[in-house]
Structure formats: structure tokens, C-alpha cells
Amino acid sequence: MSTANDTTARRMTLAASIVGSGASAKAWNWPGTKWNRFADFEHYKRSAEIARSGNLDAVFVSDHPALQRDARRGPGHLFDPIVLFSAIAAAVPDIGFVLTASTSYNSPYNLARRLASLDTISGGRVIFNAVANFNPDIAANFGADGLLDRDDRYRKADEFLEVVKKLWLSWDTPDGPEPQGPLWDENTARVIDHHGEFFDVRGPLNVPVGPQGYPVISQAGASDQGIDFAGKHAEIVYAALLEKQSAFDFAAKLDAAAQRHGRPADSIRLFPGVNVYLGDTRSEALRRHEAFSGADSEDGLIAQFLVQQRGLNPAFPDKVDADTVLKPEWFEPQEDQNRPIGFSKALQDLVRLEEPTTRQIVRRVGGAGGHRLVIGTPKEVADALIDWWADGAVSGYNAHFPLLHHDLERFVEQVVPILRSEGVFPTGYDSPTIRGRFGLPEPSTTPTEEAA
Amino acid sequence: MSTANDTTARRMTLAASIVGSGASAKAWNWPGTKWNRFADFEHYKRSAEIARSGNLDAVFVSDHPALQRDARRGPGHLFDPIVLFSAIAAAVPDIGFVLTASTSYNSPYNLARRLASLDTISGGRVIFNAVANFNPDIAANFGADGLLDRDDRYRKADEFLEVVKKLWLSWDTPDGPEPQGPLWDENTARVIDHHGEFFDVRGPLNVPVGPQGYPVISQAGASDQGIDFAGKHAEIVYAALLEKQSAFDFAAKLDAAAQRHGRPADSIRLFPGVNVYLGDTRSEALRRHEAFSGADSEDGLIAQFLVQQRGLNPAFPDKVDADTVLKPEWFEPQEDQNRPIGFSKALQDLVRLEEPTTRQIVRRVGGAGGHRLVIGTPKEVADALIDWWADGAVSGYNAHFPLLHHDLERFVEQVVPILRSEGVFPTGYDSPTIRGRFGLPEPSTTPTEEAA
């Protein structure tokens, strides 16, 4: 219905991560909070309500279908995202859902049906964040074969997306008045008869084409295979990007990948993650960052960064001074590393492009790597977000907050009004569906060559 | 927490099926209804609200993860039950959920997590109705191997239940004040290291033990394999039973099966299905039955029964008069039949025990077989329900209604008050959890020999 780029060219899109107790390892038992709120539905529902009160486009959950190894932080991934978002959908209007689910450990028919059900029930508010999963702890919960290698995982993910897209468009229901005769036939409910390397699925899906055709497809893997997969299937990409030039470079890669798969160059919206630390003054924001990192001071942050990077990178030297310029070769991603390739690449890019010292880098990214830190007063945070967006490097952000609900509430109360007054963020929901809001085209119910 | 039988000895339990537009093939476009409400979440939510207004224990959905073959009736199984009930759980308090899900076409880790998430989010309102699935149309949506044979399906179902029960009890979270030190260790979050014929699952589950330990387990298959599976795992059995003696006989079989697996004889609650047709007079109820069956008269019902039974049963004679006594050998279940064995057995039992004519049988069961018809005034319906229950044959009923919402509303307004005034049905919810309401014991978090 809507055409690409008419809306997103004019406004920033924002999602808020509502994983667990907050993005900080210190969040779960922060003074004044209920320590076990990670197991309380009302906690998640309230996060979604706060996000909605600021007109944020969506709430986001990553997922990890295994109990995490580190028992000193609250369990981030507890409720299944399908169940969690289905429950929130019935309780909170408008807000969208970035629903992370595995293409390695779901069957395409069941997941297509569950996502289509939620997309219809919520009136078109679903973004399917397809992940192939790289973690052997997850693999061990789903069979004896262990992890597929990355090429196989992405070949499977590609076939999975092919199947679910075909299923999502397989059954057109009539609009308007009561139909005479059968409710469907082989022309309106089409078998897909998919037979591939990983899946055999007949169809049609028993949920009709939904309010936005099918859920918006997003992706977050930054390996070469991940980027190629995004080029073929993704409409949104979440990424770790630590400075603006990397965002332009990454967007160019995505454009090239999309074009390789016969799609227009501007098919993919880029949403980097940001970790937001707010203070009434810059100094207060810096102290908040130090407190939630567990380092308690700038020297603590420096020590933490060096210890963690040494543990993660075989090439990282034993002795690095706080004011030594870091070298990109110390941060070389490992093919078999058990954490996102994108986090390693983002850190290496930052080091290569800006030649920072450790003292400088600890205000840009967490000690173990990860998403961009945006630290400061509400005005400074808003300016930092507007900066990349206004330059066209990104379509918006996926914001992480150290402490839920506190920092999300503060963001909505103090940063969102500035974004609005600068004319970059809306004051209401202009479309019931995510596709409508993001200016993404609805998929055609006539499968294309690509999808067929 | 509660002990078996203290509550159910004193009160009837009732669930209402909220599948699609109602149990009748005529329901979807019945005059005065919105024809496509089978795709409208508000329709299902309203059904749950009506059920709750009568203090019904639960709403029930069967499931069929494939588009049904018959396109002349509304699609009964559209929204995925996990999504549907998660959404209803956030919108409607108190009501329980009989959630049908396949042990053949889900992975135990994902389903255990999804059901545990919903059980926690809903405060302990989930009954897991485990089905092995016998339909080749479903199998074709989940791989190229086709249907497993019944023995294999039930061996897989048995192992599935073993795994999910172990997962559900694998992670104890601390109650009370904030724990010092790690939030779990190998004693409180236990790997299950399951390695079996069908599944390999490490665990622990990343959702802690829920408000009722784990969801109540129910089952509905009436084959020998199904009854054995029920004996080992089920706490509730749904069944097609057309007269009281069959209910006693079936309950005895379940008791024997439970005892074979080392459980007490009264471990399983029996809930037959009933199809309820209400009228202000008996005659009006009979007319409603004729109208919703599509037969429009008693002669029409007779003709319909004969045509359908001839189509289903190879041994059914070509010429049977309306007043000929039916013979049990005409209704012999076929090993490979593509409909529930329980429906065939129930019909055959009725014919054997009561020697009815076709004219008599058409007010007892639908033309194609199925659940018991209960037709009459509110008082007659209430008496029929109380009759079996008071004799101890059954613990309650799973009620199906020809037209949703109309007939469910009428049942709640007209039959429930009689059940209450007779002292067999409660006026409120006496426990937040299904186990509490049904008097079912909570599973021990120390796995037993049986479960281990």
C-alpha cells in the first residue's frame, strides 16, 4: 500500500530493547528495583507501555533458547518471545514487536503460522528478526548433531525464509461481503509444495495473508554470510556500528548485497544498536555509565576493557597502557568465536578509523565490545542520534537501556521531546502497521521469481 | 499443594471449546453473525470472557496445523493456540486454557519453554493437551517422511513428555529476598542430558519452575496406544463417550493404565465432550439441532446419518431403514482411518449397549459420529450433565456449542445457574491455578524414578 521511503525519509524510527531487567549486568538487583522482575510479565508489559507513551515504533527482544552461562546477571532470555509479545499485543496497543526467532531450531510451518497469527492479532505490528544462532549451548538443546557450520546455517536460514514467505502468501481470504460457495479453492489457497535441502512443506498455511502481507523481515548477523542473507531477505538490519563512517560503509555493503539479489539499492533500513546513558549533566551521565558497567570510575573502565579484550582476542598484548593507541590487528574476529562477529568487526573498525587510546575508547563501547555508547544530557543524546540519522547513515536506532524501567522512562520523557521539537520524530502513530510506519512495501501475494 | 480429589469430589469442572465460529459447519455464516469472525481475535477473546463470566474452568482449542480439506465450513484451526491463548491470557483473568499441541511436530525444548512461559505469565492456567496427530495432511507440512505409524507416534509422544517434564522441573528459582551470589548453580539449574530414540536435549530450561509446577497434562487419544500413554502421563483425558456405561468402562481402562505405570487408580480425571443444543422447550432445542446439522428435519438427520456412516464404514449396508436396529459390526474402526479412533469406538459402544435404530441414534450423536449430543431445555441439559457426574462416571465436561457466541452465552446464562443452584458448580474461582481448582497434585521438583 505505502511506497518505500516516503515516511522514513522524514522521520527517525526507534525501537527499545526490553530484554530482562535492562542491558546492564548490574540491573537485576539495582537498589530500589524488584530483583526478580525478569520473571514477571507485568515488568515487560510496563516496558512496552512506556515505549508506547513515547510513540516508539517497537519493542525488541533478542533471544537465547538456553539458560545463559553467567549466573551473576539476571537471565536476559526467559519468556519465549512469541508468548511474551502475544501477551503484550493484547494489552498494549500500537507498539510494534521485533521478535527474534531461530531459523535453525523452528520448523518453518509452525513459525510461519505463529508469526502470522501474531501479526493478524496485533493488526500488523510484527518484525521477524531471523537469527541462525551460533551458540553451541543452544544447539545442545535441539539435538545431538551440534552446531551446523556457518555456511550451512545460512543456507538453512535462506531456505527457511523462502518457505515462510511462500507460506505467508499462500492463502488469500476474500474481503467484503460473505462469499458464496466454498471459502477457498486451489486458486485462493495454494499448496507451495516446497522440497529443498532442509525442508519439505506442502502448505498452504492455515492463516490467511495478514494485515501487512507478512511480517517485516529483519536480520542482525554481520558475517559475510549474514550480509548476503540480508541482501536477499531483510528489510531491516540491526547492527553494531561504533562510528558514522562504518555505518555508511555497512549500508553500502547491504545495498550491494540487495542489488546482487535483484532488489533496489535502498531496500534495507539500517538500525544500529545504541546503549543510552543519560544524566542531567554530562558528568552525571559519565558516572552512571561507570556505575552500571561495574567499573565505578574511568580507571575502572580502562582496566575492565583491557582484561576483557585480552580474554577475547588471542592477539591482544599483555601490556597496553591507558594512553597507548590501540591497533586493529589486536581485534581480529575469530572464525569460530562464540559471540557476534558484528561486535568484533565494529570494534576493529572503530580502532582502524579513529586510532583511539583505551582511555578514549571506553566511552564509545563496553569493555567486551557491543553497541555504541551514547552518553550525556538529553540534548547531547538527542544530538548524537540526530547526527547519524540526518546524514542519512541510518534510518533509526535500536536503543538499549542499562536499567528498566528507569532509563527507558527517562529517555521517553527527556530525549523524545527534543527529537520531536527538532522535527525528526512523530507525535503519534501514523499507521497501524509497521510497513505503513516504516514506508516498506507490502509483499505481493503473487509470488515473484525470487520468492518462488 | 492441594491433594487429589478433595475439590473435584464436590464440584463439576467445565471447559468450553472456542474453536472457530462454533462446532456446527453452519456456524460461520449463520444469519446475524460476522461471517469471517474466525479470523478476528476479538471473537475468541469474547468467547473467553463469556466463559469466565460463568466461572467455567477453561476454554479449549483443538488444533490442526494444516488448512482443512472441507472449504464449505469456516476454518476451525487458524490462529496458533500458543499465540491465541497468550493474547487471551493478558486480556482475560481467571479462565484456564486447554492448549492442544503436537508431540510429533514441535521440539520439546521450544514447546516446554513456550508452555512454561504462558503458564507463568497466566499465573498457572495452562493445561497441555498433548496430541500425536494422525493426519497425513499435517505430516506433509512437516517433512517428506509422511506419518509415523501409530506405535512410533506414541513412542515419540512418550519420550516427548518425559523430556518436557524434566525440563519443566530443571530450574528452581529462589523465593523471597534477593539472593547473594550467583542466581543459579548446577544444583538449582540442572542439566537433564536426555539422550533417547527421538530427542537429545541438554537443558536446563531457561524458564523456572512455574506457579503450578508445570502445566496440567491432558490427552485425548482413545486407541490402545493412546490409553497407555494417558496411563503414564495424563492427569486429564478428553474423550467421546455416548452413554454412561461406556464412561465407566473407559474410566476403568484409564485407571488400569495408570496403575500399570505405578500411579494411583484415581490419577486421571475424565472429561467427555458434549455438544449442547438449548431451547426454551425441548421441541425448540430439537429444531435447533436439525437446523445446525444442516438436515432441517428428523428425516433429514436420518438420511444424513446413513449417508455419512456408509461413506465412513466399509461394512455399513447400502440399505438400512430408519427403524432398523443398528449392528455394532457395521461400525468397526479401521486401523488406518483418518479420523479419531475414539469417535468410532464411542459410536460402536453405543450401538452395542443400547441397540438403537437410526431414528433413535440421530439425537445422540452427529451424522459423522463425534461427541454426545445433549439437547433440551436448560433444565434438561443441566440434568443430563449432572446425571453422569453425580454417578461418578466423569469429573466434568468439555462442552461444544453449535454457534459462538450465542450458544455459549445461553449456556452460561441459563444452564450454569441451575448447576449452581444444584450445588454442583462453583460461583467463583477458588484457586488461581488449574491444579488448585481441579485438586491435582503439584509435581515434585525432585524428579521421580518414573520421570527420570
Image (spheres, coloured by chain):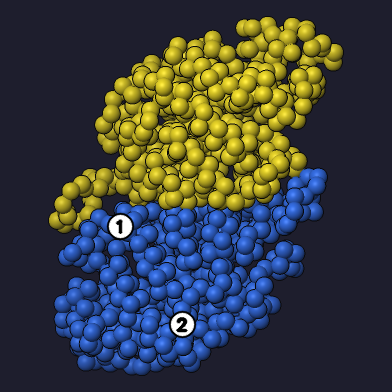
Chain colours: A yellow, B blue
Q: Is residue B41 left or right of residue A157?
A: left
Question: How crowded is the residue under tag 2: few (<14 C-alpha within 10 Å), some, or many (20+)?
Answer: many
- Asked if residue B222 can be seen in this view, the reply is no
Report in which chain the residue with disc 1 lies: B
Q: Quadrant of residue B174?
A: bottom right
Which disc, if any, is residue B38? Answer: 1
Q: Is residue B111 left or right of residue B332?
A: right
The outermost residue toward the right is A319
Q: Position of residue A437 (x, y in %)?
A: 35, 31
Q: Quadrant of the C terminus of chain B?
A: bottom right
Q: Quadrant of residue B306?
A: bottom left
Question: How crowded is the residue under tag 1: few (<14 C-alpha within 10 Å), some, or many (20+)?
Answer: many
Q: Position of residue B399 (x, y in %)?
A: 38, 75
Residues tagged by mark 1 and mark 2 found on one chain of the structure:
yes
Q: Quadrant of the N terminus of chain B?
A: bottom right
Q: Earlier in the sequence, mark 1 or mark 2?
A: 1
Residue at the location (16% across, 77% down)? B296
Q: Position of residue B240 (x, y in %)?
A: 42, 78
Q: Nearer the viewer, mark 1 or mark 2?
A: 2
Q: Say which amino acid is labelled 1.
A: Phe
Height in image: B114 above or below A436? below
Residue at the location (73% across, 9% down)? A357
Which disc, if any, is residue B425? Answer: 2
